[in-house]
Image (cartoon, rainbow, N blue to C red):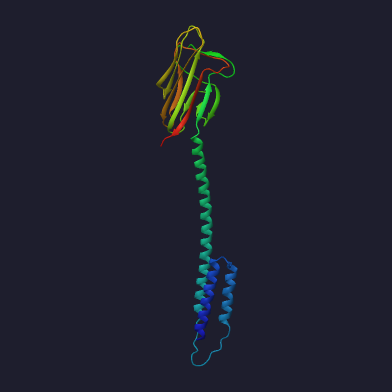
Amino acid sequence: MKGLLCVLLLLESFVFVVQQQVDGGLGKNEINHQLSSEDRRQNSPQTHTSGDSQEYSPLIFTDIQAALRELTATVTEQKANIRALETRLREQQTLLQEEMNKKNDAREIAFSTSLLRNTGGQLGPFDTEITIIYRNVFTNIGDAYNPNTGLFTAPLKGAYMFQFCIVSFDKVYPATASLRKNGSHVLNADIDIGGRVLHSSNSVVLILEVGDVISLRLWPKRVLEDNQGNHNTFSGYLLFPLE
C-alpha cells in the first residue's frame, strides 16, 4: 500500500509540475528542485507494516524523473521555436508592407513639362526628324519621364492619358509634332505657315505595357518656338493600372 501511495504522490507531483510549466509558473530550476524534493521524499526510510508491505523499486521514480526532465526540455524548446516563428512572421509582415508601399508608389505616375527652361528660343528646323526634349519639368511623379532624353517609359501596365501643345511664331516654317509609341506614329499636332502666333494641341489615351516608350517627334523642316510663357508643353499621367 505504501508503494502505491508513493506512486500516487509522485504522479500528483508530475501533474503539478507539468501544469506549472504550461502556465509559465515554474522555471527549469524550480522544476528540478521539485524533482529533487520528491527524490528525497521517496528515498527516506520507510516503515513497513506486516501483512500488505511490498518492495518499491526506485527505478520507477528514475524513469518518471527522466520523463519529466525530457518533457521540460521539450516545452522549453517549443517555446523557443514559437519565439523564432513570431520573429519570422514579423519580418515577413514588414517585407510585405514594404512591397505594398512600393506598389502604391508605382501607381502614382504623372508628369508635366515645357520645352525650354526660363528663356525663350527656337527648336529647328532640322533636315531629319528628332525627338523633342522637354527640359523644363513642372512635375515628374514616379520619375517615368526622362528630361535628358525626352522619353516617357511606362513603369507598369495601365491606361495613360497624354496631352501636348505646340506653338510657332515663325512666318516661314510650319510646325508639326507627332506622338509616338515605341517609335510608331500615333497622332499629330500641326501648325501651318502664318504671320501670327499659332497653337495646336492633341491628346490621347493609350494602353501601355511595362517598358513601353512614348515620345514626341519634330518633323523635318519644322520649328517650335517658345518663351517664358511656356507655350510648348507635354504631359501625361496614369489613369488606372491594368492586370
Which residue is more in the foreground, 25 or 32? 25
* Horizontal and vertical percent position of residue 96: 50, 45
Q: x, y (%) of residue 126?
A: 47, 12
The residue sitting at 55% across, 69% down in the picture is 20
> In the displayed structure, would residue 192 be above or below residue 3?
above
Q: Is residue 26 left or right of residue 161?
A: right
Where 37 sits versus 170, above or below? below
Q: Position of residue 102 (x, y in %)?
A: 51, 39
Residue in the picture at 52% in, 64% down: 75
Of residues 229 and 155, the one nearer the viewer is 229
Q: Identify which residue is drawn at 52% across, 42% down.
A: 98
Q: Position of residue 18 (x, y in %)?
A: 53, 70
Q: Residue placed at 51% from the left, 55% from the top?
A: 85
Q: Where 235 falls versus 176 (above or below)?
A: below
Task: Tell me the quadrant of the picture where the C terminus can be found.
Answer: top left
**In the current view of this chain or complex, which residue is farthest to the bottom?**
50
